[in-house]
């Protein structure tokens, strides 16, 4: 039974639907400014600027209370943004098809990083987890690179094997082994949330690419007892505390429930319009991670419901424009690559908002383009650069990914 005969059967000529004769007052420059690539550039630039302002606001409070006179957190954030923008511009100019040719090399480098970070002499242990490779004041998180590496590899794999993705061996067994290896290495750090995040994004690509959803459902069901045992026996106490805090934060308001309660206080204090830029009280050492994972709470306190709604709308628009690029990709690899990058950034933003509002257990995923965290900003902007390169090539191509396959099904 087919529930989706042709996921690629979509309007591939959205850019050609508006002609000068029917534009009715819209000139060509105005129309072009609304192309997905341009809209994404506007959105990402705006989010980066908001991030710079908010990181300065939150980190200045910490600097004022410390002995140092320099805002190191803010300076590091700006330095990473400069590096990330440079990387984005390079990826914009680089043909994304090179990524398909070197997808195996990229994956091997990612796996090597996940192994190296587990070596005690190399990986820095912070809060019970070994996730960072430190070089002076800068740090690199291999799991962030693994997110993008998995998207690139799986996109290439699906594009190459699209006629066999409905089969059990090619369409499920081979990819699931790879996903399992990457996830297990990340679980060793341990980082349960990132492992689950990579698994979800990978399954999105596989199911869209033709893997039968029934395989995924049975795997998830069979994995529940194993995941439960890993979570109970292998993870530090603080990660168990996060789950308990999500269920009932008021049971221990000064302990495991402290962070989410302080986040609620920040969001509630902002009201409709907020207290004003720089006027947050929760950033004054009440809310941990106020410049990183919980920066959305400070935005809510200083800019209120209006400010947080605007941030959410911008990420929704980003997802929409990313899907527009996805739909007009010149080939299957571009389609799945654009889909993976868009889904990854949009899903990460959604999880971050859900965490700070107490909708799901606390997980250390930064808010894309806004939170501090050099690895996250760098890899997010590299992904944006790839997305924009796909968009540029789409404008010069009459061949769409929607002609790739006409009889794929998700469930048979």
Image (spheres, helix red, strand yellow):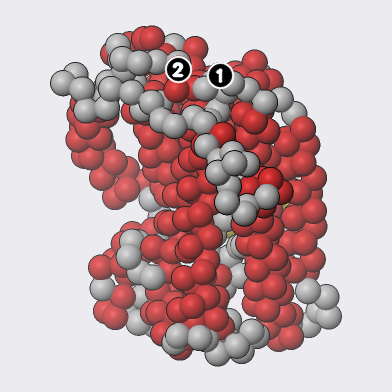
Question: x, y (%) of residue 140?
Answer: 68, 46
Up the image or down, 319 lies above or below 329; here it is: below
Q: Does the CB distance between marks 2 and 1 fall below 8 Å?
A: yes
Up the image or down, 77 lies above or below 109; here it is: below
**Residue that badge 2 annotates:** 403
Secondary-structure class at tag 1: loop
- Residue 53 falls left or right of residue 342: right
Name the residue at 70% across, 65% down.
49
Residue farthest left in this picture: 1
Alpha carbon separation for disc pair 2 and 1: 8 Å
Name the residue at 45% across, 79% down.
305
Question: x, y (%) of residue 5?
Answer: 28, 22
**Residue that badge 1 annotates:** 399
Up the image or down, 371 lies above or below 408; here it is: below
Q: Which part of the image, by quadrant, shows the C terminus?
A: top left
- Determine the image quadrant of residue 148: top right
- Badge 2: how crowded within 10 Å, few (<14), some, or many (20+)? some
């Amino acid at each position: 039974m087919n529930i989706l005969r042709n996921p690629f059967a979509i309007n591939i000529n959205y850019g050609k639907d508006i002609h000068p004769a029917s534009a009715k007052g819209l000139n060509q420059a105005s129309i072009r400014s609304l192309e997905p690539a341009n809209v994404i550039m506007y959105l990402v630039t705006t989010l980066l600027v908001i991030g710079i302002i908010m990181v300065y606001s939150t980190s200045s409070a910490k600097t004022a209370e410390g002995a140092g006179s320099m805002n190191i957190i803010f300076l590091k954030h700006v330095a990473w943004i400069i590096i990330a923008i440079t990387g984005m511009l390079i990826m914009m100019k680089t043909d994304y098809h090179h990524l398909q040719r070197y997808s195996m090399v990229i994956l091997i480098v990612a796996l090597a990083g996940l192994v190296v970070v587990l070596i005690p002499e190399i990986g820095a242990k912070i809060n019970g987890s070994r996730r960072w490779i430190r070089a002076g004041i800068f740090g690199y998180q291999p799991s962030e690179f693994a997110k993008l590496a998995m998207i690139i590899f799986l996109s290439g794999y699906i594009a190459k094997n699209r006629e066999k993705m409905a089969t059990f061996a090619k369409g499920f067994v081979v990819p699931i082994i790879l996903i399992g290896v990457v996830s297990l290495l990340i679980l060793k750090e341990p980082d349960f949330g990132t492992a689950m995040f990579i698994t979800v994004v990978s399954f999105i690509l596989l199911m869209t690419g033709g893997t039968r959803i029934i395989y995924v459902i049975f795997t998830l069901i069979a994995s529940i007892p194993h995941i439960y045992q890993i979570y109970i026996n292998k993870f530090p106490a603080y990660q168990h505390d996060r789950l308990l805090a999500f269920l009932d934060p008021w049971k221990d308001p000064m302990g495991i429930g402290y962070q989410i309660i302080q986040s609620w206080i920040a969001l509630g204090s902002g009201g409709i319009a907020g207290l004003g830029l720089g006027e947050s009280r929760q950033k004054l050492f009440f809310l941990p991670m106020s410049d990183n994972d919980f920066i959305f709470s400070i935005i809510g306190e200083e800019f209120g419901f209006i400010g947080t709604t605007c941030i959410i709308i911008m990420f929704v628009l980003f997802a929409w424009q990313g899907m527009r690029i996805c739909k007009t990709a010149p080939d299957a690899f571009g389609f799945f690559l654009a889909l993976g990058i868009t889904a990854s950034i949009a899903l990460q933003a959604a999880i971050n908002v859900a965490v700070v509002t107490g909708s799901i257990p606390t997980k250390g995923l930064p808010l894309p383009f806004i939170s501090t965290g050099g690895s996250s900003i760098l890899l997010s902007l590299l992904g944006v650069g790839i997305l924009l390169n796909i968009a540029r090539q789409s404008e010069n191509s009459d061949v769409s990914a929607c002609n790739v396959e006409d009889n794929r099904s998700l469930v048979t």
